[in-house]
């Protein structure tokens, strides 16, 4: 078992995604600023909490439905490709793009390895 394939990692990331879903639903000022910076239209923003909540459920399903958890990491990889692309497109500060790049690498690696089989 490695850290990338551990159910505890999936659970921690599910909690992070759930918290991010709540923060996007409020929305917190730093999130609004970041979305304004990358030019995400107001009409798309209500979808973000739904997507993030769904990803939290998908990640949390790892012990019962490992294939769903792996599909979720693949879709999160795509999400972070788009997020990083948005930062690059607007020539955002490197520091603002780093979290997208880190999560892109993390979820891509998790997709490649898949969750632990019990």
Image (cartoon, rainbow, N blue to C red):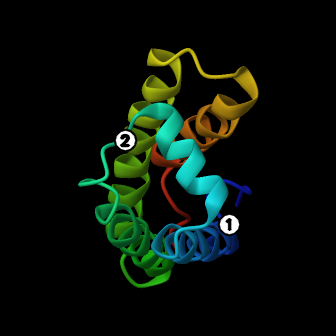
Q: How many marks?
A: 2
**Residue shown at the point (34%, 50%) measured from the top left:** 75
Residue 112 visible to the viewer: no
Residue 80 visible to the viewer: yes
On the picture, is 77 further left or further right than 44?
A: right
Residue 70 point in image, percent of width and height: 40, 58
Label 1 Cα crowd, 10 Å radius (few <14 / some 14-19 / many 20+): some
**Residue shown at the point (52%, 26%) measured from the top left:** 87
Q: Quadrant of residue 96?
A: top right
Residue 73 point in image, percent of width and height: 44, 54
On the picture, is 30 further left or further right than 109?
A: right
Residue 109 point in image, percent of width and height: 56, 40
Callout in the foreground (1, 2): 2
Label 2 Cα crowd, 10 Å radius (few <14 / some 14-19 / many 20+): some
Residue on which the image places disc 2: 40
Which residue is more in the foreground, 20 or 116? 20
On the picture, is 65 further left or further right than 38?
A: left
Q: Are marks 1 and 2 in contact (CB under 8 Å)?
A: no
Residue on which the image places disc 1: 9
Is disc 2 placed on a helix, strand or loop?
loop
């Amino acid at each position: 078992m490695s850290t990338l394939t551990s159910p505890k990692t999936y659970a921690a990331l599910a909690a992070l995604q759930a918290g991010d879903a709540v923060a996007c639903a409020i929305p917190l000022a730093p999130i609004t600023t970041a979305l304004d910076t990358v030019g995400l239209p107001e009409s798309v923003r209500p979808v973000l909490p739904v997507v993030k909540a769904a990803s939290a459920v998908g990640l949390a399903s790892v012990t019962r439905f490992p294939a769903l958890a792996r599909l979720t990491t693949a879709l999160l990889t795509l999400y972070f490709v788009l997020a990083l692309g948005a930062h690059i497109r607007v020539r955002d500060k490197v520091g603002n793009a780093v979290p997208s790049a880190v999560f892109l690498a993390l979820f891509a690696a998790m997709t490649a390895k898949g969750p632990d089989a019990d």
